[in-house]
């Protein structure tokens, strides 16, 4: 049973809405970061420093125009990303991220530049 809508935006980089949805080219992992230390008396103290830090895996097929846009993001120090978050008021959460593990592969050669498979990860840049 599918719990998502096909016309809903799940991932947007800058002004590009990507053709992905959960289980189909889009995977979101949220992690918490904490610090654990001990006092002189031996008491363990846990301090949660960041919660729900996103890491997004992306993979989809596209034309040469979208390929050029995606390729430009890999060299940028950061990109503005909007991703689906059910707990967010409007369904999308905004974050500053960067692209890692960028890969592209031509699937079919066409007169207008081909059909390409693009995959990459989006990692949180931290508090900027």
Image: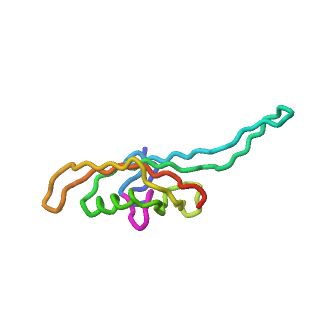
Residue at the far bottom: name it.
15
Q: Residue 47's spot in the image, x, y percent?
A: 73, 44
Seen in the image, is 48 located left or right of residue 91? right
Q: Residue 97's spot in the image, x, y percent?
A: 49, 57
User: Residue placed at 84% from the left, 35% from the top?
Assistant: 40
Residue at the far top: name it.
42
Q: Name the image quarter holding residue 74.
A: bottom left
> In the depicted view, which residue is nearer to us: 17 or 99?
99
Q: Residue 64's spot in the image, x, y percent?
A: 24, 60
Residue 84 in the image: above or below residue 40: below
Number of residue marks? 0
Residue 10 in the image: above or below residue 45: below
Q: Is residue 61 magenta?
A: no
> In the depicted view, which residue is nearer to us: 87 or 44?
44
Seen in the image, is 116 located left or right of residue 57? left
The quadrant the C terminus occupies is bottom right
Q: Which residues are magenta?
A: 9-18
User: Residue placed at 41% from the left, 52% from the top?
Assistant: 21
Residue at the far right: name it.
41
Q: Residue 20's spot in the image, x, y percent?
A: 38, 53
The quadrant the N terminus occupies is top left
Seen in the image, is 68 located left or right of residue 39? left
Residue at the far left: name it.
111
Q: Describe the colour scheme in one phrase.
A: rainbow
> In the depicted view, which residue is nearer to us: 24 or 59?
59
């Amino acid at each position: 049973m599918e719990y998502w809508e096909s016309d809903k935006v799940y991932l947007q980089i800058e002004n590009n809405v990507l053709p992905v949805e959960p289980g189909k080219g889009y995977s979101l992992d949220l992690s918490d970061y904490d610090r654990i230390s001990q006092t002189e008396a031996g008491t363990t103290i846990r301090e949660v420093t960041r919660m729900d830090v996103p890491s997004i895996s992306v993979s989809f097929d596209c034309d040469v125009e979208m390929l050029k846009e995606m390729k430009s993001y890999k060299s940028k120090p950061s990109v503005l990303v909007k991703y689906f978050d059910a707990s967010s008021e409007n369904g999308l959460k905004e974050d500053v991220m960067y692209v890692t593990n960028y890969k592209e592969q031509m699937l079919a050669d066409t007169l207008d530049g081909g059909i390409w498979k693009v995959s990459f990860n989006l990692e949180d840049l931290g508090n900027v």
